[in-house]
Image (cartoon, helix red, strand yellow):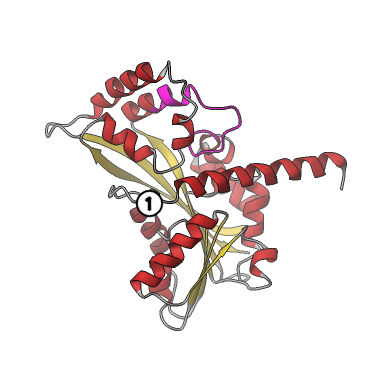
Amino acid sequence: MTGAQTEAQAEAQQRRAGVADLFDQLAPLYDQSGVPWFGPIAQRLVALVGPQPGEHALDIGAGRGAATFPLREAVGATGHVTAVDLSPAMVGLLEREALERGVAGIYAIVGEAGPATLGAERFDVVTASLVLFFDPDAESTLRGWFELLRPRTGRLGITSFAGIDEHWAAAEAALLAHAPAGALDPRTTGTRGPFASSEALESLFRACGASQVETVVEPLLVTFPDAAAWRAWTMGFGLRQFWASVPESALPGVLAEIELALDGDRGDDGQLHLTQQVRYTTARAA
């Protein structure tokens, strides 16, 4: 291993630690707004990978369990689900939710999805919903995820974003103008390279040894009464890091620009109707 490789690995590890810190901060508010977002996306992903009773499933970047709980229901009493997340706070809240729901058979652990955390176990199904674009080395990470699957029969599915409506995009552009260099987020790294198109992401999957790669892109509609409600919602996930980067002196102008942009999505009912295209990419292990 060269010095350059060691340095790159150290930088990647440091950036992953930054992601873990961000989601530790987000954990109390994460997916708690009442806006149908992470849940519908994760449920659709689980349906597409098709977990069966008795199978062993792994949910990577599990957060508070948007995909974990549907996976647990699908594999039934004879199956089990492992949920892994870099954020200790997220894992703690997932475990508490499982206890409150009376759901057994979920093994939640803190760490990366690799042999050091998971041992030699191989899984029938692996899901990672809205996760991969946070990784500083997506190709190496995805290749490692495929190695966690049972050969030929194992299925892996991820979700990413395929674009938002023009008014929503204009609103986010006002915020992202203040984004720090190198920020890992679906609106930065998640729009470039393999995430720029379905074709590019499928090519990445095949380069990592996948077979039967398929992509489905579907719209998800979210509704807010006004721009203030939209802002409050964004404080509960990754966009929060960009609000923190807006200088106090610039904030009134940014808020005004966002309000003007989002008004283009206002319907006859007076509500803001925003559309996100969600990309679901699934494949089998070779």
Indicate the position of residue 258 as horizontal and vertical percent values: 33, 23
Indicate the position of residue 226 as horizontal and vertical percent values: 23, 31
Indicate the position of residue 11 as horizontal and vertical percent values: 72, 40
272 displayed left or right of 277:
left
Which residue sits at x=65%, y=48%? 139
Residue 25 visible in the shown view? yes
Give yes or no for residue 187 being in the magenta stretch.
yes
Q: Residue furthest left?
A: 269
Q: Residue furthest right?
A: 2
Q: Which residues are magenta?
A: 172-188
Q: Nearer the viewer, residue 188 or 240?
A: 240
The amino acid type, in three-letter code, at marker 1 is: Phe
Q: Say which quarter of the image contains residue 259.
A: top left
Main secondary structure type of the part rendered in magenta: loop
**Residue holding disc 1:** 38
Name the secondary structure under disc 1: helix
Which residue sits at x=40%, y=72%? 99
Residue 62 visible in the shown view? no
